[in-house]
Image: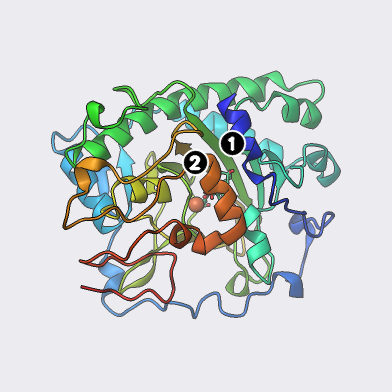
């Protein structure tokens, strides 16, 4: 049932798919509808910043908790190795995604996301906030993919469903473990978070699986794969395969590429963990670029709390000097707010401006105070 609630988060903000029949795979010249003017000039990389590397953390390291906490504060993102997700599962799910996107357009649209729905095939929901379209296709799974898989492969849907189920199971375990390491590093334990058990595999826990596909692009300098955004999650586990494209916005540095590291998974801090941590952890702003010769596939596991639980700054992190920065909000409500306000969603739930000051990664005009 909780996944149903998550699927209903967009009811009051339907989204209509633009350019239903445009197949990016067969276009030889970038259409005006997809030509972004300032893709590369916005937030130029700063001299000396190219030495900055997104942290790489070994889950087997005895100091993993501290390292993860530090990376979550300073970057809001890190690459995770020795995560224990098997290579064959990662290969299988990547293949399943490639098989999906290589289907004919009319077949993919049979599993099209409905305007007020959350799952199925379509362009990124955030498309409606930008004047130009993105050079990508997406497929979102919430709960079981059975209904959509049947539409995609009427004779042969079971294999896809089995792989998704295995992947969701493994991701849920890893996400729970990571959440506790992230919270543990702030001194938070099970007694402090009533809705989660010690594995973070809470009853009614929610997640979405997002396949992103970026076809090779005739004019990558002027195209955008996935526009800058933060994820509305506790955390996101991204499998970005072996083609580069992911970039993160680093304060004072501009856009920094997250190079694919064989076998590594990329972990993002999302908006809800930023809220839970009362602003201590950085909800990382990121985007995906495209390239001229290679198709790129990425797969995001978007992990959140049970969709009806109110999320607010954890009491242990709040005191006279650190007042709560955000009002309580459920994941489902937050997704609705994001569908309405996009980059301003976090600001719309903010109670006060922090004394010591942090940068709201979504707020282009934010000024540090204190
Ligand atoms: C749970 C969710 C987060 C997400 C919206 C969704 O309902 C499922 C897709 C997710 C995704 C993936 C690509 C980027 C993003 C901003 C988008 O448009 O769809 C995220 C959404 C989010 O984190 O807000
Ligand atoms: O494709 C990527 O590297 C990024 C995908 C992403 O940001 C997302 O799915 O939320
Ligand atoms: Fe993202």
Q: Residue at coordinates 37% horizontally, 45% vertically from top-left?
A: 267
Quarter of the picture containing the N terminus is: top right
Q: In this orientation, which residue lies closer to the viewer: 183 or 18?
A: 183
Q: Residues within 10 Å of mark 1 (few under 14, many from 20)?
A: many
Q: Which residue does the numbered mark 2 point to in the structure image?
A: 331
- Residue 6's tag is 1
- Asked if the residue under mark 1 is in contact with the one under mark 2, i.e. CB atoms within 8 Å, the reply is yes
Determine if the C-beta at disc 2 is less than 8 A from ligand 1.
yes
For residue 161, what is the image quadrant? top right
Q: Residue at coordinates 66% horizontally, 45% vertically from top-left?
A: 10
Q: In this orientation, which residue lies closer to the viewer: 233 or 346?
A: 346
For residue 194, what is the image quadrant? top left
Measured as percent of width and height from the top left, residue 87 is found at: 43, 30
Can you name the residue that lies furthest to the left here?
A: 62
Q: In this orientation, which residue lies closer to the viewer: 324 or 306?
A: 324
Quarter of the picture containing the C terminus is: bottom left
Measured as percent of width and height from the top left, residue 247 is found at: 44, 61
Measured as percent of width and height from the top left, residue 236 is found at: 43, 43
- Residue 254's tag is none
Q: Residue at coordinates 60% horizontally, 47% vertically from top-left?
A: 212
Determine if the C-beta at disc 1 is less than 8 A from ligand 1.
yes
């Amino acid at each position: 049932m909780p996944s149903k609630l998550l699927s209903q988060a967009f009811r009051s903000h339907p989204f209509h798919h633009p350019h239903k029949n445009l197949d990016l795979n067969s276009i030889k010249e970038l259409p005006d509808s997809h030509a972004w003017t300032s893709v590369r000039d916005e937030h130029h990389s700063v001299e000396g910043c190219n030495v900055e590397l997104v942290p790489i953390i070994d889950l087997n390291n005895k100091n993993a908790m501290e390292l993860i906490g530090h990376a979550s504060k300073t970057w809001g993102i890190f690459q995770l190795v020795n995560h224990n997700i098997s290579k064959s599962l990662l290969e299988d799910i990547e293949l399943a995604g490639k098989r999906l996107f290589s289907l004919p357009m009319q077949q993919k649209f049979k599993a099209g996301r409905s305007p007020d729905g959350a799952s199925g095939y379509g362009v990124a929901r955030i498309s409606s906030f930008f004047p130009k379209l993105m050079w990508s296709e997406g497929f979102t799974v919430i709960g079981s993919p059975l209904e959509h898989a049947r539409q995609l492969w009427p004779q042969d849907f079971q294999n896809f469903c089995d792989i998704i189920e295995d992947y969701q199971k493994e991701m849920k375990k890893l996400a729970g473990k990571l959440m506790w390491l992230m919270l543990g590093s702030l001194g938070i334990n099970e007694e402090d978070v009533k809705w989660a058990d010690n594995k973070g595999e809470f009853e009614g826990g929610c997640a979405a699986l997002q396949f992103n596909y970026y076809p090779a692009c005739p004019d990558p300098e002027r195209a955008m794969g996935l526009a800058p955004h933060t994820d509305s999650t506790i955390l996101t586990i991204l499998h970005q395969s072996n083609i580069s494209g992911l970039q993160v916005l680093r304060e004072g540095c501009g856009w920094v590429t997250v190079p694919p590291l064989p076998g590594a998974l990329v972990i993002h801090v999302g908006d809800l963990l930023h809220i839970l941590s009362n602003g201590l952890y950085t909800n990382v702003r990121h985007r995906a670029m495209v390239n001229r010769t290679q198709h790129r596939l990425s797969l995001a596991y978007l992990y959140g709390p049970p969709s009806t639980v109110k999320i607010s700054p954890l009491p242990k992190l709040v005191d006279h000097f650190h007042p709560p920065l955000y009002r309580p909000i459920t994941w489902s409500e937050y997704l609705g707010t994001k569908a309405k306000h996009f980059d301003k969603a976090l600001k719309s739930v903010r109670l006060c401006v922090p004394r010591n000051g942090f940068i709201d990664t979504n707020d282009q005009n934010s000024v540090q105070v204190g």
